[in-house]
Each structure stands twice: as structure tokens, then as C-alpha cells.
């Protein structure tokens, strides 16, 4: 029988190996943060914080680097979550980029992730929930495109693997022929054409310049039950998309009622929370999502459809007659979730990482 000393000697190399692996992983993530950071944006963020809160520059950046290495938090997350004004106990409550990467990697299949990443595949696989007309204009005959745009005033063009709203164009069809459209799509590499969605009049009144979507994040359990992790209403301001990255704002939704429960926030940390929509002046807190129960049923149906991807952020639009599925995101970015909640949500995901 081995004594305590022998056990320690035997396990020491294992512990050192595990420790080295963790350190290497931290360094890899840190290097990724350095590479992926928008440095111009970071300078703007840091200047705002230094000026507003009178934090010494050296102290601000030292803590930022510490958060990146110790907690796996990207440099931008450090500013999004206000970590410069938080103690370590509060910072640890946030699901950092590194943590969420591990969570998503564990539950989403690399082999089947294009069911979500590629909008052409998504529309095909989830066609019963997409509930709108679409085609690939690069492969379609002119007659098919003509039929698609007949009687329409607008059309939506997308690059099927585009992200964060930067590969979406809402096109006014006045004076545009099917031939013009096809040539534009071939020239600018738009390979998805969808009918323009006329949203529910209440959402249109709230935020009139964009299609406003509801993001609902789900986790599919082994018994095929679906956990709803959180939900938010995403609204555009001046642009035609509601993405955070294109200047949109978002607000947390109470899952049980479908009512917005917090002021909206922006990715621009210099902007205060929005109690009213800046275009319509309609109050955001208390806004009730139309067809909320139907929205929940839709994401539950979507979540079990292809169980290879178990954690997805579903984007839903609501028409006058009910919800339609816009897209699914395997990397749904916990940042927007935690910013709209105004607190760290790591505890909601920890139970799945055991």
C-alpha cells in the first residue's frame, strides 16, 4: 500500500502537466485577444473610462491584462462589463469569452455547425419555421427571380455566411429588374435572396427603421428537454439592421411574461441606458413582445430539430400573424446577454460544464 509521500510523488507530474496545459491555454487565449482586438475602439473605450472615472492609465490596463489572463476575458469585454469598477468576486460572475468558447465547443458539433452558420443551409433545414420565400439568386433562372420580386417593393439580399449584419442589404426594387438583381448578386457575391419581412405593427412603431428581432438562447438537454437561458429584444436606431455591431440597442426580456424588464443598452460604453427608443420615444421597459408564447414554442421546436447543436441563440421576427425564424447562432455571444442583464450570468452555464 502506497504511503502519503509516494502518492504525492506520483501525482506531482500529473498536476504539473495539468497546470502547464492550463497555462498554455490561457496564453493562447491571451494571444487571440491581442490579435482580434479593435485597437482604435479600445483607445476610445479606455479614453472614456480614464476621463470619466479618473482611473490611472497604468492601473486600468494592468487590470485589463490580468482579467484577460486570469479569467479569459477579452479586452473589449473588460470595458463592456465595467470590470475596471468591479472587484474580483464580481468579475468572476461573468461568463468570459474563453469560458463561453469552451461551453459552445462542448455542446455544438463542428461537423454540423454549418446548419447554423450557412444561411442557405439554415433556410433549407429549418424551412417549416423560416416561413418566408427565399432562393439562391446566383443559381436561379431569371423567371424564378421575377416571380420572387413580383408585387414586392423591397427585397433582402444576403451573403449566406456573413455575420453581425454586415452582409445584409435591404434593396428598394423600384426600377430594378430580375436581370439587374442577378447581375448585382453575382458581382457582389450575394447568394441568398429573401422576401422582405413586414413586422408586427407594435414592433414597427417602437423601432421603425429596422427589422427588430427577439434573440432567445436555448440549451438542449440529454433527455431532449429545452432550457431557455435568456431572451432580449434587439432594436435598430438609424440603420436597417438591429445588430449591436451596427449601432443597435438591446433590452432584456422576462422569459415568463415576454415583457421587457430593463432599459436598453448599446455596445458603445459612453452611451447611458435607453429608457425610451431614441427614434420613436416609446418607453422600452414594459414593452410586451407580441405572440410571446408562440416565440417560445418556436425555439423549442427549432432546438430539438437537429440535436447536434445543443446551445443556440435563435433570432425571431414577429409578423402580424405570428413569429418566424430568422437565423440561429452557434456562437451567440454571451456578451450581449450579460450587458442586457446588467450582471454576470456565468452561473447559468456552469451547471452544463460539470
Image (spheres, grey):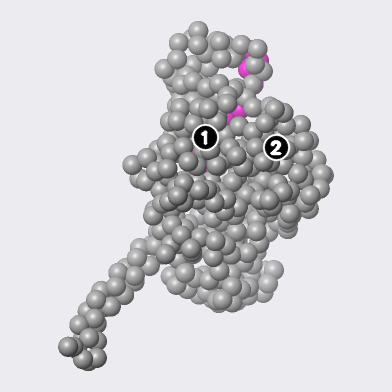
Apparent side of residue 114 relative to residue 52 in the rendered image (left or right):
left
Q: Quadrant of the N terminus?
A: bottom left
The one of 288 and 97 positioned closer to us in this rendering: 288
Residue 335 included in the magenta stretch of the image: no
Residue 31 appears at what percent x and percent y? 38, 62
Would residue 271 be found to the left or right of residue 123 on screen?
right
User: Could you tell me if the residues under marks 1 and 2 are in contact, i.e. CB atoms within 8 Å?
Assistant: no
Percent position of residue 245, x then y: 58, 46
Q: Residue furthest top?
A: 143
Residue 285 visible (yes or no): yes
Q: Residue furthest left?
A: 1
SS at mark 2 in the image: loop
Q: Is residue 297 above or below residue 345?
A: above
Is 267 on the left-hand or right-hand side of 286? left
Q: Quadrant of residue 69?
A: bottom left
Report the mark closest to the observer, 1 or 2. Answer: 2
Query: Label 1 neighbourhood size at 10 Å, few (<14), some (14-19), many (20+)?
Result: some
Residue 98: where, in percent of width, then height?
A: 44, 61
Per the picture, the main secondary structure of the magenta-coloured stretch is: loop
Rendered view: 216 above or below 317: below
Q: Which residue is rendered at x = 21% and y = 91% of the image?
A: 3
> Which of disc 2 and disc 1 is earlier in sequence?
1
Q: Residue at x 71, y 35 (%)?
A: 209
Residue in view at x 24 percent, y 87 percent: 8
Q: Which mark is residue 167?
A: 1
- Residue labelled with disc 2: 291
For the magenta stretch, what is the residue range?
Answer: 163-176
Which part of the image, by quadrant, shows the C terminus?
bottom left
Q: Which mark is residue 353?
A: none
Amino acid at each position: 500500500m502506497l504511503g502519503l509521500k509516494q502518492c504525492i510523488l506520483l501525482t506531482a507530474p500529473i498536476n504539473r502537466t495539468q497546470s502547464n496545459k492550463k497555462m498554455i491555454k490561457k496564453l493562447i487565449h491571451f494571444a487571440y485577444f491581442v490579435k482580434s482586438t479593435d485597437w482604435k475602439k479600445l483607445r476610445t473605450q479606455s479614453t472614456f473610462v480614464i476621463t470619466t472615472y479618473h482611473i490611472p492609465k497604468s492601473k486600468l490596463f494592468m487590470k485589463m491584462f490580468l482579467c484577460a489572463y486570469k479569467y479569459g476575458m477579452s479586452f473589449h469585454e473588460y470595458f463592456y462589463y465595467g470590470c475596471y469598477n468591479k472587484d474580483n468576486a464580481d468579475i468572476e460572475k461573468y461568463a468570459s469569452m474563453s469560458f463561453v468558447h469552451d461551453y459552445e465547443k462542448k455542446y455544438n458539433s463542428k461537423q454540423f455547425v454549418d446548419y447554423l452558420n450557412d444561411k442557405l443551409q439554415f433556410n433549407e433545414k429549418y424551412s417549416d419555421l423560416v416561413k418566408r420565400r427565399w432562393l439562391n439568386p446566383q443559381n436561379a433562372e431569371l423567371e424564378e427571380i421575377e416571380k420572387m420580386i413580383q408585387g414586392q417593393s423591397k427585397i433582402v439580399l444576403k451573403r449566406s455566411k456573413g455575420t453581425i449584419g454586415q452582409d445584409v442589404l435591404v434593396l428598394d426594387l423600384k426600377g430594378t429588374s430580375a436581370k439587374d438583381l442577378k447581375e448585382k448578386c453575382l458581382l457582389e457575391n450575394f447568394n441568398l435572396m429573401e422576401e422582405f419581412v413586414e413586422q408586427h405593427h407594435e414592433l414597427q412603431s417602437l423601432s421603425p427603421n429596422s427589422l427588430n428581432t427577439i434573440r432567445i438562447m436555448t440549451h438542449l438537454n440529454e433527455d431532449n428537454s429545452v432550457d431557455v437561458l435568456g431572451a432580449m429584444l434587439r432594436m435598430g436606431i438609424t440603420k436597417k439592421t438591429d445588430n449591436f455591431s451596427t449601432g443597435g440597442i438591446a433590452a432584456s426580456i422576462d422569459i415568463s411574461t415576454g415583457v421587457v424588464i430593463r432599459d436598453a443598452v448599446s455596445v458603445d460604453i459612453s452611451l447611458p441606458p435607453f429608457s425610451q427608443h431614441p427614434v420613436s420615444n416609446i418607453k422600452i421597459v414594459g414593452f410586451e413582445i407580441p405572440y410571446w408564447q408562440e416565440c417560445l414554442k418556436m425555439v423549442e421546436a427549432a432546438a430539438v430539430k437537429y440535436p447536434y447543436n445543443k446551445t443556440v441563440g435563435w433570432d425571431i421576427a414577429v409578423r402580424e400573424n405570428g413569429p418566424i425564424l430568422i437565423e440561429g447562432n452557434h456562437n451567440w455571444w454571451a456578451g450581449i446577454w450579460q450587458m442586457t442583464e446588467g450582471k454576470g450570468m456565468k452561473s447559468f452555464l456552469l451547471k452544463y460544464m460539470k
